[in-house]
Image (cartoon, rainbow, N blue to C red):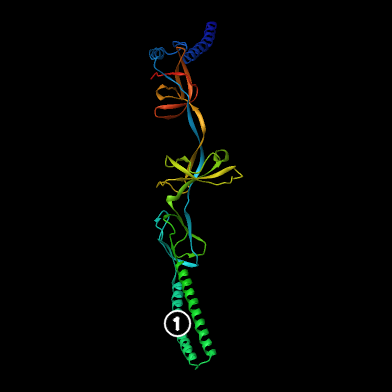
Amino acid sequence: MTHNKADKSTVQKIFIPVIALTVLLLMVAWLAGSFNDKVAPALNNSINNKAMVAQHNHYLLVATKEAVFEPVAASLEAKQATIISARILARIEQINTRSGDLVKKGDLLIQLEQNDLQSQVLQTKQNIIAIQARVIEAKQNLDRAVELFKTKLVSEFELDKNRATYQMIHAELIAAKQALSQAQTTLSYASLIAPIDGRIVDRFAEPGDTAQPGVKLLSLYNPLSLRVEAQVREQLALTLTHGQTIEIELPSVNKIIQGEIEEIVPAANTGSRSFLIKARITYHENLLPGMYARMLIPAGEQTKLTIPVDSVAHVGQLDFVWLNVDGEIQRRFVRLGKEKNGMITVVSGLMAGDKVLMIK
Protein backbone atom coordinates (compact mmCIF):
# COMPACT_ATOMS: atom_id res chain seq x y z
CA MET A 1 0.00 0.00 0.00
CA THR A 2 2.83 2.29 0.84
CA HIS A 3 4.51 1.43 -2.44
CA ASN A 4 1.43 2.47 -4.50
CA LYS A 5 1.21 5.82 -2.74
CA ALA A 6 4.86 6.51 -3.54
CA ASP A 7 4.31 5.71 -7.24
CA LYS A 8 1.29 7.98 -7.37
CA SER A 9 3.21 10.84 -5.79
CA THR A 10 6.02 10.43 -8.32
CA VAL A 11 3.59 10.54 -11.25
CA GLN A 12 2.02 13.73 -9.94
CA LYS A 13 5.42 15.39 -9.56
CA ILE A 14 6.21 14.62 -13.20
CA PHE A 15 2.75 15.29 -14.66
CA ILE A 16 2.15 18.76 -13.14
CA PRO A 17 5.34 20.40 -14.57
CA VAL A 18 4.59 18.83 -17.97
CA ILE A 19 1.10 20.35 -17.96
CA ALA A 20 2.45 23.76 -16.88
CA LEU A 21 5.11 23.68 -19.60
CA THR A 22 2.54 22.71 -22.22
CA VAL A 23 0.23 25.56 -21.20
CA LEU A 24 3.15 28.01 -21.32
CA LEU A 25 4.14 26.87 -24.80
CA LEU A 26 0.56 27.19 -26.03
CA MET A 27 0.37 30.76 -24.68
CA VAL A 28 3.64 31.71 -26.36
CA ALA A 29 2.44 30.24 -29.65
CA TRP A 30 -0.85 32.13 -29.36
CA LEU A 31 0.89 35.42 -28.67
CA ALA A 32 3.18 34.80 -31.65
CA GLY A 33 0.12 34.45 -33.90
CA SER A 34 0.60 30.76 -34.69
CA PHE A 35 -3.18 30.18 -34.61
CA ASN A 36 -3.97 33.11 -36.99
CA ASP A 37 -4.39 32.86 -40.75
CA LYS A 38 -1.19 33.73 -42.65
CA VAL A 39 -1.22 36.21 -45.55
CA ALA A 40 1.63 36.06 -48.02
CA PRO A 41 3.34 39.41 -48.83
CA ALA A 42 1.73 40.97 -51.92
CA LEU A 43 -0.04 44.11 -53.09
CA ASN A 44 -3.46 44.63 -51.61
CA ASN A 45 -5.99 43.40 -54.15
CA SER A 46 -8.29 46.35 -53.55
CA ILE A 47 -5.47 48.81 -54.21
CA ASN A 48 -4.23 46.75 -57.13
CA ASN A 49 -7.67 46.65 -58.67
CA LYS A 50 -8.20 50.33 -58.01
CA ALA A 51 -4.88 51.17 -59.58
CA MET A 52 -5.61 48.95 -62.55
CA VAL A 53 -8.92 50.71 -63.08
CA ALA A 54 -7.29 54.13 -62.85
CA GLN A 55 -4.12 53.14 -64.65
CA HIS A 56 -4.74 55.72 -67.34
CA ASN A 57 -5.11 58.46 -64.69
CA HIS A 58 -1.58 59.33 -63.69
CA TYR A 59 0.62 62.38 -63.17
CA LEU A 60 3.82 62.60 -65.20
CA LEU A 61 6.69 64.20 -63.27
CA VAL A 62 8.39 67.03 -65.12
CA ALA A 63 11.54 68.73 -63.79
CA THR A 64 11.29 72.52 -63.55
CA LYS A 65 13.85 75.17 -62.75
CA GLU A 66 13.33 77.15 -59.56
CA ALA A 67 15.25 80.13 -58.22
CA VAL A 68 17.19 79.38 -55.04
CA PHE A 69 17.39 81.96 -52.26
CA GLU A 70 19.89 81.84 -49.45
CA PRO A 71 18.48 83.21 -46.17
CA VAL A 72 20.88 85.56 -44.38
CA ALA A 73 20.28 86.62 -40.78
CA ALA A 74 19.60 90.36 -40.56
CA SER A 75 18.11 92.96 -38.25
CA LEU A 76 15.96 96.05 -38.54
CA GLU A 77 17.78 99.33 -37.98
CA ALA A 78 16.68 102.95 -38.13
CA LYS A 79 18.44 105.12 -40.69
CA GLN A 80 17.38 108.23 -38.78
CA ALA A 81 18.08 107.77 -35.07
CA THR A 82 19.36 110.23 -32.51
CA ILE A 83 20.29 110.49 -28.85
CA ILE A 84 18.86 113.43 -26.92
CA SER A 85 21.34 114.86 -24.41
CA ALA A 86 21.88 118.18 -22.63
CA ARG A 87 24.53 120.75 -23.55
CA ILE A 88 24.56 122.38 -20.13
CA LEU A 89 24.68 121.22 -16.51
CA ALA A 90 21.22 121.76 -15.05
CA ARG A 91 18.48 120.05 -13.06
CA ILE A 92 15.66 118.42 -15.04
CA GLU A 93 12.31 120.05 -14.33
CA GLN A 94 10.05 118.16 -16.72
CA ILE A 95 10.13 115.26 -19.21
CA ASN A 96 7.11 115.20 -21.52
CA THR A 97 7.53 111.80 -23.17
CA ARG A 98 8.00 108.12 -22.39
CA SER A 99 9.11 105.07 -24.36
CA GLY A 100 6.86 104.43 -27.35
CA ASP A 101 5.47 107.98 -27.63
CA LEU A 102 5.27 109.55 -31.09
CA VAL A 103 6.65 113.07 -31.34
CA LYS A 104 6.78 115.75 -34.01
CA LYS A 105 9.80 117.81 -35.00
CA GLY A 106 9.95 120.84 -32.67
CA ASP A 107 8.00 119.26 -29.79
CA LEU A 108 9.35 120.06 -26.31
CA LEU A 109 10.80 116.84 -24.90
CA ILE A 110 12.67 117.94 -21.77
CA GLN A 111 12.65 121.19 -19.82
CA LEU A 112 15.71 121.98 -17.72
CA GLU A 113 15.92 124.50 -14.89
CA GLN A 114 16.39 127.95 -16.42
CA ASN A 115 16.02 130.58 -13.68
CA ASP A 116 19.74 131.42 -13.62
CA LEU A 117 19.88 131.53 -17.42
CA GLN A 118 16.87 133.85 -17.60
CA SER A 119 18.53 136.13 -15.04
CA GLN A 120 21.66 136.30 -17.19
CA VAL A 121 19.61 137.21 -20.24
CA LEU A 122 17.77 139.95 -18.31
CA GLN A 123 21.03 141.29 -16.88
CA THR A 124 22.59 141.40 -20.34
CA LYS A 125 19.59 143.26 -21.74
CA GLN A 126 19.80 145.89 -18.98
CA ASN A 127 23.52 146.27 -19.64
CA ILE A 128 22.77 146.92 -23.32
CA ILE A 129 20.25 149.62 -22.38
CA ALA A 130 22.86 151.34 -20.19
CA ILE A 131 25.51 151.15 -22.90
CA GLN A 132 23.06 152.45 -25.52
CA ALA A 133 22.52 155.53 -23.30
CA ARG A 134 26.27 156.06 -23.12
CA VAL A 135 26.54 155.67 -26.89
CA ILE A 136 23.93 158.36 -27.39
CA GLU A 137 25.81 160.66 -25.02
CA ALA A 138 29.15 159.94 -26.66
CA LYS A 139 27.64 160.55 -30.11
CA GLN A 140 26.26 163.91 -29.00
CA ASN A 141 29.63 164.90 -27.53
CA LEU A 142 31.35 163.91 -30.76
CA ASP A 143 28.90 165.87 -32.89
CA ARG A 144 29.37 168.91 -30.63
CA ALA A 145 33.14 168.61 -30.80
CA VAL A 146 33.00 168.45 -34.60
CA GLU A 147 31.00 171.71 -34.76
CA LEU A 148 33.29 173.45 -32.28
CA PHE A 149 36.36 172.26 -34.17
CA LYS A 150 34.98 173.86 -37.35
CA THR A 151 34.84 177.20 -35.51
CA LYS A 152 38.29 176.64 -33.99
CA LEU A 153 36.86 176.64 -30.43
CA VAL A 154 38.32 173.20 -29.59
CA SER A 155 41.57 171.62 -30.54
CA GLU A 156 42.01 168.64 -32.76
CA PHE A 157 43.13 166.70 -29.69
CA GLU A 158 39.74 167.18 -28.05
CA LEU A 159 37.99 166.10 -31.24
CA ASP A 160 40.05 162.93 -31.46
CA LYS A 161 39.42 162.21 -27.81
CA ASN A 162 35.63 162.46 -28.24
CA ARG A 163 35.79 160.28 -31.38
CA ALA A 164 37.79 157.59 -29.55
CA THR A 165 35.37 157.67 -26.62
CA TYR A 166 32.42 157.16 -28.97
CA GLN A 167 34.09 154.28 -30.81
CA MET A 168 35.04 152.58 -27.53
CA ILE A 169 31.51 152.81 -26.14
CA HIS A 170 30.06 151.64 -29.47
CA ALA A 171 32.37 148.61 -29.34
CA GLU A 172 31.13 147.89 -25.83
CA LEU A 173 27.56 147.96 -27.21
CA ILE A 174 28.46 145.42 -29.91
CA ALA A 175 30.09 143.17 -27.31
CA ALA A 176 27.04 143.47 -25.05
CA LYS A 177 24.77 142.44 -27.93
CA GLN A 178 26.99 139.42 -28.59
CA ALA A 179 26.80 138.53 -24.89
CA LEU A 180 23.00 138.78 -25.09
CA SER A 181 22.93 136.45 -28.10
CA GLN A 182 25.15 133.98 -26.27
CA ALA A 183 22.97 134.14 -23.14
CA GLN A 184 19.83 133.58 -25.19
CA THR A 185 21.46 130.63 -26.94
CA THR A 186 22.46 129.14 -23.58
CA LEU A 187 18.90 129.69 -22.37
CA SER A 188 17.59 127.78 -25.40
CA TYR A 189 19.73 124.80 -24.34
CA ALA A 190 17.42 124.44 -21.34
CA SER A 191 14.58 123.39 -23.66
CA LEU A 192 15.34 120.11 -25.46
CA ILE A 193 13.16 119.74 -28.53
CA ALA A 194 12.67 116.89 -31.00
CA PRO A 195 15.02 117.27 -33.99
CA ILE A 196 12.95 114.89 -36.17
CA ASP A 197 9.52 113.28 -36.38
CA GLY A 198 9.76 109.93 -34.68
CA ARG A 199 9.15 107.58 -31.79
CA ILE A 200 10.81 107.58 -28.38
CA VAL A 201 12.78 104.35 -27.90
CA ASP A 202 13.97 104.72 -24.33
CA ARG A 203 14.05 107.19 -21.45
CA PHE A 204 17.19 107.36 -19.28
CA ALA A 205 16.34 110.10 -16.76
CA GLU A 206 13.54 111.38 -14.55
CA PRO A 207 12.53 114.85 -13.31
CA GLY A 208 14.81 115.97 -10.49
CA ASP A 209 17.91 114.34 -11.97
CA THR A 210 20.85 116.50 -12.95
CA ALA A 211 21.49 116.56 -16.68
CA GLN A 212 25.15 116.55 -17.60
CA PRO A 213 26.53 117.60 -20.97
CA GLY A 214 26.74 114.67 -23.40
CA VAL A 215 24.94 112.17 -21.15
CA LYS A 216 21.97 110.62 -22.97
CA LEU A 217 18.49 111.38 -21.68
CA LEU A 218 16.25 110.03 -24.48
CA SER A 219 16.71 107.97 -27.63
CA LEU A 220 14.59 108.70 -30.68
CA TYR A 221 14.19 107.15 -34.12
CA ASN A 222 12.14 107.79 -37.24
CA PRO A 223 9.83 104.77 -37.96
CA LEU A 224 9.67 105.77 -41.62
CA SER A 225 13.42 105.29 -41.98
CA LEU A 226 13.64 101.62 -40.99
CA ARG A 227 15.85 99.42 -43.11
CA VAL A 228 17.31 95.92 -42.98
CA GLU A 229 21.02 95.36 -42.47
CA ALA A 230 22.89 92.07 -42.83
CA GLN A 231 26.40 90.71 -43.21
CA VAL A 232 26.34 88.79 -46.51
CA ARG A 233 29.15 86.42 -47.48
CA GLU A 234 31.35 87.91 -50.13
CA GLN A 235 30.47 85.41 -52.90
CA LEU A 236 26.80 86.44 -52.71
CA ALA A 237 27.40 90.09 -51.87
CA LEU A 238 29.38 90.66 -55.05
CA THR A 239 26.35 89.60 -57.12
CA LEU A 240 24.15 92.34 -55.63
CA THR A 241 23.73 95.81 -57.10
CA HIS A 242 22.37 99.14 -55.89
CA GLY A 243 18.63 99.42 -56.41
CA GLN A 244 18.15 95.66 -56.74
CA THR A 245 14.90 94.33 -55.28
CA ILE A 246 15.15 91.42 -52.85
CA GLU A 247 12.70 89.61 -50.59
CA ILE A 248 12.92 90.04 -46.84
CA GLU A 249 11.32 87.58 -44.43
CA LEU A 250 9.99 88.80 -41.09
CA PRO A 251 9.35 85.70 -38.92
CA SER A 252 7.90 87.63 -35.95
CA VAL A 253 5.01 89.02 -38.02
CA ASN A 254 4.93 86.10 -40.50
CA LYS A 255 5.42 88.31 -43.57
CA ILE A 256 7.64 88.47 -46.62
CA ILE A 257 8.13 92.03 -47.90
CA GLN A 258 10.08 93.64 -50.70
CA GLY A 259 13.29 95.53 -50.02
CA GLU A 260 15.54 97.64 -52.21
CA ILE A 261 19.30 97.61 -51.73
CA GLU A 262 20.39 101.17 -51.03
CA GLU A 263 23.90 100.68 -49.70
CA ILE A 264 26.71 98.15 -50.05
CA VAL A 265 29.59 98.99 -47.73
CA PRO A 266 32.66 98.76 -50.01
CA ALA A 267 34.86 96.96 -47.48
CA ALA A 268 34.65 93.37 -46.29
CA ASN A 269 34.64 92.26 -42.68
CA THR A 270 37.99 90.50 -42.37
CA GLY A 271 36.74 88.20 -39.63
CA SER A 272 33.69 86.81 -41.42
CA ARG A 273 34.65 87.65 -45.03
CA SER A 274 31.32 89.35 -45.54
CA PHE A 275 29.96 92.70 -46.68
CA LEU A 276 27.42 94.86 -44.86
CA ILE A 277 24.30 95.17 -47.03
CA LYS A 278 21.56 97.70 -46.26
CA ALA A 279 18.12 97.45 -47.85
CA ARG A 280 15.33 100.01 -47.74
CA ILE A 281 11.83 98.79 -46.85
CA THR A 282 8.39 100.37 -46.77
CA TYR A 283 6.79 101.41 -43.50
CA HIS A 284 4.95 98.78 -41.46
CA GLU A 285 3.48 99.76 -38.11
CA ASN A 286 4.38 96.44 -36.47
CA LEU A 287 8.10 96.75 -37.19
CA LEU A 288 10.53 98.03 -34.57
CA PRO A 289 14.31 98.53 -34.53
CA GLY A 290 16.28 95.48 -33.49
CA MET A 291 13.74 92.94 -34.76
CA TYR A 292 15.04 89.80 -36.46
CA ALA A 293 14.74 89.46 -40.22
CA ARG A 294 16.14 87.33 -43.03
CA MET A 295 17.37 88.60 -46.38
CA LEU A 296 16.55 86.12 -49.13
CA ILE A 297 19.56 86.54 -51.42
CA PRO A 298 19.32 85.00 -54.94
CA ALA A 299 21.79 82.10 -55.15
CA GLY A 300 21.14 80.52 -58.57
CA GLU A 301 18.65 77.86 -59.70
CA GLN A 302 17.84 74.25 -58.85
CA THR A 303 15.79 71.45 -60.40
CA LYS A 304 12.43 70.95 -58.73
CA LEU A 305 9.95 68.07 -58.81
CA THR A 306 6.39 68.45 -57.55
CA ILE A 307 3.46 66.04 -57.32
CA PRO A 308 -0.19 66.50 -56.36
CA VAL A 309 -0.85 66.22 -52.63
CA ASP A 310 -3.69 63.77 -53.38
CA SER A 311 -1.24 61.24 -54.85
CA VAL A 312 0.63 60.78 -51.56
CA ALA A 313 -0.24 57.93 -49.16
CA HIS A 314 1.05 57.41 -45.65
CA VAL A 315 2.17 54.52 -43.49
CA GLY A 316 2.75 55.82 -40.00
CA GLN A 317 5.22 58.66 -40.48
CA LEU A 318 6.40 57.41 -43.86
CA ASP A 319 5.15 58.85 -47.16
CA PHE A 320 4.88 56.85 -50.37
CA VAL A 321 3.30 56.99 -53.82
CA TRP A 322 2.11 54.38 -56.32
CA LEU A 323 3.95 54.37 -59.64
CA ASN A 324 3.05 52.99 -63.02
CA VAL A 325 6.27 51.23 -64.04
CA ASP A 326 5.90 49.57 -67.44
CA GLY A 327 2.24 48.80 -66.76
CA GLU A 328 2.94 47.39 -63.29
CA ILE A 329 2.13 48.98 -59.97
CA GLN A 330 5.07 49.79 -57.73
CA ARG A 331 5.14 51.44 -54.34
CA ARG A 332 7.88 54.04 -53.81
CA PHE A 333 8.73 55.73 -50.51
CA VAL A 334 9.51 59.43 -50.88
CA ARG A 335 10.79 62.34 -48.84
CA LEU A 336 8.69 65.46 -49.25
CA GLY A 337 9.22 69.18 -48.83
CA LYS A 338 6.92 72.18 -48.69
CA GLU A 339 3.32 72.18 -49.89
CA LYS A 340 1.91 75.01 -51.97
CA ASN A 341 -1.33 75.34 -53.95
CA GLY A 342 -2.15 71.62 -53.79
CA MET A 343 1.31 70.57 -54.98
CA ILE A 344 4.12 69.24 -52.79
CA THR A 345 7.84 69.24 -53.46
CA VAL A 346 9.64 65.89 -53.77
CA VAL A 347 13.02 65.96 -52.08
CA SER A 348 14.03 62.40 -52.93
CA GLY A 349 12.58 59.09 -54.11
CA LEU A 350 11.35 60.10 -57.60
CA MET A 351 12.83 61.41 -60.80
CA ALA A 352 11.60 63.23 -63.87
CA GLY A 353 9.51 60.99 -66.15
CA ASP A 354 8.01 58.86 -63.36
CA LYS A 355 4.25 58.23 -63.64
CA VAL A 356 2.53 58.76 -60.29
CA LEU A 357 -0.89 57.11 -60.02
CA MET A 358 -3.73 59.21 -58.69
CA ILE A 359 -5.19 56.57 -56.38
CA LYS A 360 -7.21 58.86 -54.15
In this view, the residue farthest toward the right is 270
The residue at which mark 1 appears reads as 130
The residue nearer to you, when weighing 165 against 271, is 165
Q: Amino acid at mark 1?
A: Ala
Q: Quadrant of the C terminus?
A: top left
Q: Does residue 276 sit above or below 145 in this rendering?
A: above
Residue 292: x, y in percent?
A: 48, 44
Residues packed near mark 1 inside 10 Å, few (<14), some (14 to 19) or many (20 plus)? few
As displayed, is residue 48 above or below residue 109? above
Tell me where residue 225 appears, x and y as whole percent: 45, 50
Residue 46 location, x and y as percent? Answer: 39, 13
Mark 1 lies on a secondary structure that is helix
| Number of on-image labels | 1
> Relative to 343, is 230 above or below?
below
Residue 315: image quadrant is: top left
Q: Which residue sits at x=41%, y=58%?
A: 105
Q: Is residue 126 above or below residue 291?
A: below
Residue at (46%, 69%) from the top-left corner?
A: 185
| Residue nearest the viewer, comparing 131 with 73 | 131
